[in-house]
Amino acid sequence: MKVVILAAGKGERLEPITHTRPKPFVPVLGSTLVERTIQIIRKADPKSDFFIVVPKDRPNEYDAYFSRLHNIKLVEQGEKRGTGGALSSLQSIDDEVVVVYGDVYLEEMGIRRIFETDGNAILGVRVQNPSEYGSLKMDSEGNLIEIVEKSPNPPSNIVNGGVYKLTSDIFSFIDKLEKSPRGEYELTDAVTRLALTSKVKIVKYDGYWKDVGRPWDILDINKHELERHETSLKGEVEDNVKIYGNVIIDEGAKVLSGTRIEGPVYVGRGSTIGPNSYIRPFTVMASNVKIGTSVEVKESVIMEDTKIPHLSYVGDSVIGEDVNFGAGTLVANLRFDEKEIYVNIKGRKESSGRKKFGTIVGAHVRTGINVSILPGIKIGAYAKIYPGSVVDRDVDKAEFFKGLRSS
């Protein structure tokens, strides 16, 4: 089976995390979203051939991330934008193909059901908010009639799960695609046209599923993944460390004396915690993270090589790779009025759906000492925050922010 993973999207809604890394490489415990997807597919079909569609004008960091994967072929997307344009880059495929969106998180059963279905198939996921997705209109036998995108009156609560099994006939419909109102060539339009001439079976799936499109989705998928694992202490744990609940401490990690960890928690390879740190439930630390003396972290994802060394608090946040927090950097994660926290997503405010949500910090950010970051704030990659600043607005990529405390 040929498997195509669509990873050419810019991931603008996930900025600033996607300033430096492809959206499919957001962390999932000690792995990434795309690596996890490949692993699941290989369980369903160990002999699958993988093609990953990447942007032609991608930053240098993209190749560094994708070089971590083995036995795959990178395919550059051509001039045609969108999911349909991405698949048009693979016209040489003359057999059945499984297509997976690179930003989809789901359980193994969803993939396996697609592989086990004969002919054309699309994964249908039951959700509570179908108007936010492509809703599936189906006939009495469960075959696709039409994919209705983000309609206020969706035809069903079954939506496009971003996984397809398609015969090579799909390419003839992709060739005839015209630009959608978004200015892109949409795979969903081609699949709808295919359904007019051939059966496209809707494979219903009721397991956990997430379209990872907002920064808080990174917290959600890691929380779900943590709940599926039991305690595994492969790293070094010093005396006088208290561990409660399910905690994973990977090889090469160290937990120093006086530290308290309340699971579920994941500590990645080469990371160091303590002494005297407090790690609260649903915290994920990727490889080579440093959490130092008197630092408290709660329900956050901390990416590779980041250092939070002294006297800091981080709650309900996503922190990118190679970030360094100066001593006394504090993240606020609760409004005074305790209302839901809104975040700027592509120029407009969106509710995170959370009363507690901290900050989203891009890669290579540096903060000085005694910095305070207010709830829902985004800090772009390579930004520098001056000592004593109160960060009360979003900070642009590579910006030098100086917002001093009032005297």
Image (tube, rainbow, N blue to C red):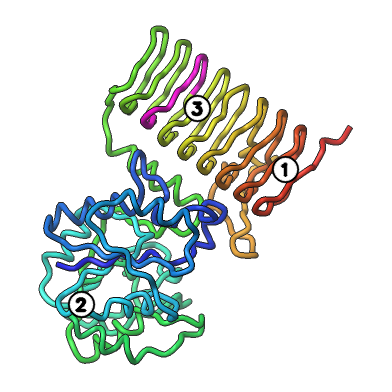
Q: CB of mark 3 within 8 Å of CB of mark 2?
A: no
Q: Main secondary structure of the magenta part?
A: loop
Q: Choose between 78 and 276: the one closer to the eye.
A: 78
Q: Disc 3 or disc 1, which is closer to the eye?
A: 3
Query: Could you tell me which secondary element the residue under label 3 belongs to?
Result: strand
Q: Earlier in the sequence, mark 2 or mark 1?
A: 2
Give the label, 3 or 2, closer to the camera: 2
Q: Which residue is mark 2?
A: 93
**Viewer can see residue 125:** no
Nearer to the camera, 130 or 195: 195
Amino acid under label 1? Val
- Residue linked to disc 3: 290
- Residue 331 in the magenta stretch? The answer is no
Instruction: Left or right? Give the position of 14 relative to 366.
Output: left
Inter-mark Cα distance, 3 to 2: 46 Å
Instruction: Identify the residue under disc 1.
Output: 391
Percent position of residue 146, x then y: 31, 83
Whether 186 is drawn above or below 362: the answer is: below
**42 is higher (above) or lower (below) than 348:** above
Q: Which region shows up in magenta?
A: 264-278
